[in-house]
Amino acid sequence: MSSPENAPVNSPVSSPVNSPISSPINSPISSPILAPTAPIARLFFVALALLFLAIVLDELRVPGTQIAVRYKSLARALPLAWLACLALPAGRRALPYRATPSDLPLALFVIAAALSVAFGGRHWGDIRHLVAAIGIGLLTRSLLTSRTGRQQVLALFAVTFAVVLQHELRVHPDLWPPHEMGRYDLVTANPNVLGFLFAMTAPLLLAWAVAAHGAWRVIVGLGFAAAVLGVLLTFSRVAAVGLAAGTVVVLATLPERRRALLVASSAMVVFVASSRPDQWVHLRHSGDSYRPSIMATAVRIGLEHPVLGVGFGINNLEEIFADRYEASYGERIFRFHSANQLLDLFAGTGLVGTTLALWWMGRVGATALGWVASAAGTSARIQAAGGLGAFVAIVVMSMGEPPLYAGKLLPLLFVLLAVIETGPRGDTARS
């Protein structure tokens, strides 16, 4: 009897009970990186690549003119253009809407977040950013119709990381070798936000590098190396923990996991030694001492507004957070959120929004776990573990950084979630 490792490419694979998986397959990753077949899909992929570049540079300037396009404008225009394509039969065939089990709770969460602003807050900016980012994620799903589409998106992340590192080192060459004070010189984004981006994507890049062959292994392998270096440059402790958690998930699925874990442990020792924790400055220590009080303030705000909170978004929290902290502790606070996504959602959207957000992420996690459980063969299982590792990294880091309130991170987060939910081949999961 042949093993799943040697199953024919087109042979059906039975899924476990209640698994959201349709039929992932095991097939070596050896095909070249190609553009999507439909011209309109190629156009949207180029636009997505431009969005990634605009996020790194803040804006794209048209050569020889004063015209500049901000990343926020691109992030809002792309979903609208995709929706316009869906109005045409050719557009629906080339870029179809692809449902996943998380769509319903995510839609309900967005409604709850909007209601929280309508009844408790005044600022709609973060709602607009959230809706645009979700649209980018849905567009990305439509591009992931095959393994090739998934390769393209991961290659895009790898290239983006290289551009980020080049951009940062060009502006501040003294960032190398990495040192803690250098994190305050980063220009792409807040160091914790930038570290979040590197760390959440690294497990997927690692998994596909292990499972791939030839040039593709080199591309995603270099992308993973860039992500690790990026985390080191940011000196983000949250990102370091997320990177470690996601990597362990991937390594645990390897055939020779003991050797892999030993190598990873050695690499982690080198990583920590490179960051020289013995020389860390005390600049962040005072902020750390405030964390329990800050988190307690978020809980109090949520308890005072238990249904829909004070309004989704960092700007709505800013309206009340510092005053509420001063009333409790007799001093003003330098921060307008708790740096914990769950607590910030409780304060901003109440029990309704928080419950729906947990349901949404629970469905995403179940889908990622389902891909691993029903993967046919080692290659597909490792690739699926990359998605699960990325999800674990996101969850772990969200306890120390609120990604839904980070404007630059948000579109890339939903692109990554699209990759996670569509599985190793780019299939959509079924509820």
Image (spheres, grey):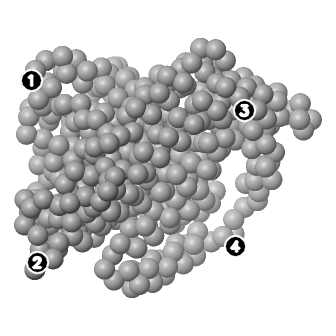
Q: Which residue is mark 2?
A: 2
Q: Secondary structure at mark 3?
A: helix
Q: Regarding mark 1 in the picture, which secondary structure is present there?
A: helix
Q: Which residue is mark 4?
A: 278
Q: Is residue 222 visible?
A: no
Query: Disc 1 or 3, which lies upstream in sequence?
Result: 1
Residue shown at 47% from the left, 57% from the top = 392
Residue extending farthest front: 17
Label 2, label 4: how many angstroms apart (C-alpha)? 54 Å
* In this rendering, position of residue 72 left or right of residue 11: right
Q: Amino acid at mark 1?
A: Ala
Q: CA distance from mark 4 to mark 1?
A: 60 Å
Q: Using the rendered view, name the quadrant where residue 15 is placed.
A: bottom left
Work out whether mark 3 precedes mark 2 in sequence or the reverse, and give the earlier one: 2
Residue nearest the observer in this picture, 338 or 431: 431
Q: Nearer the viewer, mark 4 or mark 1?
A: 1
Residue 201: x and y in percent read 39, 54
How many angstroms separate mark 2 from mark 1 (CA)? 42 Å
Q: Quadrant of the C terminus?
A: top left
- Residues at badges 1 and 3 in contact (C-beta under 8 Å)? no
- Residue 429 appears in the rendering: yes
Mark in front: 2 vs 1: 2
* Residue 97 placement: quadrant: top left
Residue in view at x 19 percent, y 21 percent = 86
Q: Nearer the viewer, mark 1 or mark 3?
A: 3
Q: Earlier in the sequence, mark 2 or mark 4?
A: 2
- Circle 1 sits on which residue? 90
Is the residue under label 2 in contact with that under label 3 (CB below 8 Å)?
Answer: no
